[in-house]
Amino acid sequence: MPQPSLRQSPPGLREWLANAIHASRTALTTAEAKRGFGVSACAGLFLALIGPFGSDQAPMLVRLPYWIGLCVAGAVVGTGVSHLVDRDGRAESRPVLYGSLVAIGITLPFTGVVWLVTELAFHAGTPRLPALPIYLGPVFTITAAMTALNFLVQRKPPETHAGPAGAPAPRFLERLPPRLRGAQLFAVAAEDHYLRLYTSRGEDLILLRLSDAVAELEGIEGAQTHRSWWVAKAAVQEARRTDGRAILTLPGGVEAPVSRAYARALREAGWF
């Protein structure tokens, strides 16, 4: 006898869940995820050495697998949670909000795992159910710290993308002073409340925030290489390192800095 339709999940919901689970599994194999697992393993090693929350009373042979195992397991859960939370790619614009959602999303289910493993590793006998709420605070604290650390390590710069053939010119080009109209835009750099424009026809200043400029530069392939610089990818002539930092050389000898926070992502994207 077929089951009543009320017992069946709507096809749309089943399809969404299947796609979400598949996407989360795929996210675990990316280079970004593997780098996050490495960061988590190092953090676990550090926690094993310092022995927080009373774990310093246990021998090192117990602390090492305990902390490293939990941190890596948390990273696996966190990869899935962060992928579901940020399916539309808006985390870069609101990192605090999305980071908080990820931390909460990991803490709620993972507290049970930490409770069970801790009770078995450090307390003889049956796990104490009344002790479960005690783990919420420490788990959230470590999860929030790990979420922030992974965000900093894997942070991507705000990017702009080339528009399709026949697309209208980026809105930002309408802001160019009359003498620079029609010039090729190389870079935009923040100077106090102004932006310095570097173009094929020279330089000039306009009054605008860099974040607003980046939003209007969509249509030109480029990226924010530093908190105060946006650079067009086609304008990069050379890249070099000095004092541990990357510098991009643009036409006219203009040098644009690359922040350490964005260096890895830009290097993997083929900027240098």
Image (cartoon, grey):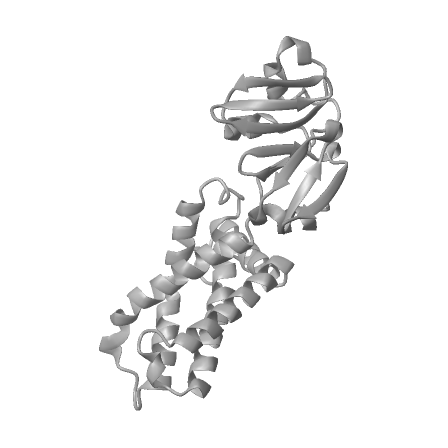
Q: Residue furthest bottom?
A: 125
Outermost residue toward the top in this view: 178
Residue 6, by quadrant, is bottom left
In the image, is 27 to the left or to the right of 96?
right
- Residue lying at 43% horizontally and 55% vertically, measured from the top left: 102
Choose between 157 and 123: the one closer to the eye. 157
Q: Quadrant of residue 110?
A: bottom left
Q: In the displayed structure, would residue 168 be above or below residue 93? A: above
Give the percent coordinates (x, y) of residue 171. 60, 20
Front one among 27 and 23: 27
Total numbered circles: 0
Q: Against 176, is 118 above or below?
A: below
x and y, in percent, of residue 154 in the image = 56, 53
Q: Determine the residue positioned at 59% across, 37% down.
A: 224
Vertical relation: 177 (above or below) 61: above
Pinpoint residue 169: horizontal percent, then vertical percent.
Answer: 67, 20
Q: Can see residue 133?
A: yes
